Image (cartoon, rainbow, N blue to C red):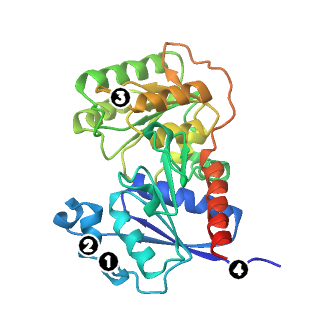
Amino acid sequence: MTAEPVSCLVITDGRRGIENQALGLAEAVARLRPTNITPLIIDAGAAFKAASPSLQFALKSKLSDYGIKDAPPDMAIGCGRQAIAPLFALKKAAPTCFTAYIQDPRLDPARFDLVIAPTHDALTGANVETMIGSPNRIIKAEIAGKTINFADQLDVLPMPRAAFLIGGHSKTHKLTQKTHANHLATAKTVIEKGHSLLITLSRRTPDFARQSWRELADTHKHIWLYDGDGPNPYNAFLGGAEILFVTEDSTNMLTEAASTGKSVFRLPMEGNPGKFQTLYDALGARCNIQRFNGKFDITAYEPLNETARIAERFWAHYDARFAVMN
């Protein structure tokens, strides 16, 4: 007999990196047991967004305040600061709703049923699970499918191919003129060694770097630059490249690249990495990810699949909670 699907509300502020983490976990959970996923994007004014989650909840504690009109779901997964107050509202309205939060909430983890945080945040607690990096939506079937979908564009670029996944400014990292010059020099070295390039830029990539990458693509025949126009070939780049270069600012892109099992190199950024050095060390130990030293080969490793592991832990916490309730 097939189990009845559970309902899962996925709450984010709609930013792609945040939404991908929450949906990535929800989809991994659904691959293990029947689950109906409903995304919810919280859209609030600037003043409300700036308030602390506790103050937000004090101001808006009803489900209708967040556009939740149907019956509360069996579970809810939130990611990003704006998801915290809605999770509190769900727990108030329906104490049996299993609430999970991704990232360090910067408040007592016990206010959720489960908190999933990156190892480099050093968060602990009875209901805390940690992982290398963050959940993502990358699975082999999706990479293979997208690679096939973009086969015509990939086929005109001779192998071997190298993908450059470029981020930008963050709270801890800066993509300066100096760091960009380093990235560009690495790309030119890779071209000189006979590789075609697959380059994708982030919304956070500064304009000066964006223009420079365009100029490089205009002067070399075997470069595919994706700058946000048309269907996104990101997964096809992961599948179509033999080697991946990723800027150090993006936990998501680093762990997504590591999920391929391919050679991955970090592109340096300016700033104090702080706790992110723990992430770099973990990826170095687990997946041999390092900064590029002119040599392409790294020791083979098993593809990183932390999202699937955490999905199993999610269900373990879910079952344990309801076993206690019953």
Q: Which residue is mark 1?
A: 61
How many numbered tags mark residues here? 4
Label 1–label 2 contact, CB within 8 A? yes
Q: Nearer the viewer, residue 206 or 247?
A: 247
Q: Position of residue 43 (x, y in %)?
A: 29, 69
Residue 222 at least partly seen: no
Q: Amino acid at mark 1?
A: Ser
Q: Amino acid at mark 3?
A: Pro
Q: Which residue is mark 3?
A: 273
Cα distance in 3D space between marks 1 and 2: 6 Å
Of the 4 image quadrants, the one containing the N terminus is: bottom right
Tell which residue pokes out farthest to the right in this image. Answer: 1
Q: Sequence order check: which comes first, mark 4 or mark 1?
A: 4
Query: Label 3: few (<14), some or many (≥20) within 10 Å?
Result: some
Residue 298 bears which disc, if any? none
Q: Which residue is mark 2?
A: 58
Q: Amino acid at mark 2?
A: Ala
Of the 4 image quadrants, the one containing the C terminus is: bottom right
Which of discs 2 and 4 lies nearer the camera? The answer is 2
Q: Nearer the viewer, residue 24 or 211?
A: 24
Q: Position of residue 238 (x, y in %)?
A: 56, 40
Q: Amino acid at mark 4?
A: Glu
Q: Position of residue 28 (x, y in %)?
A: 62, 58
Q: Sequence order check: which comes first, mark 2 or mark 4?
A: 4
Cα distance in 3D space between marks 3 and 2: 35 Å
Residue 4 bears which disc, if any? 4
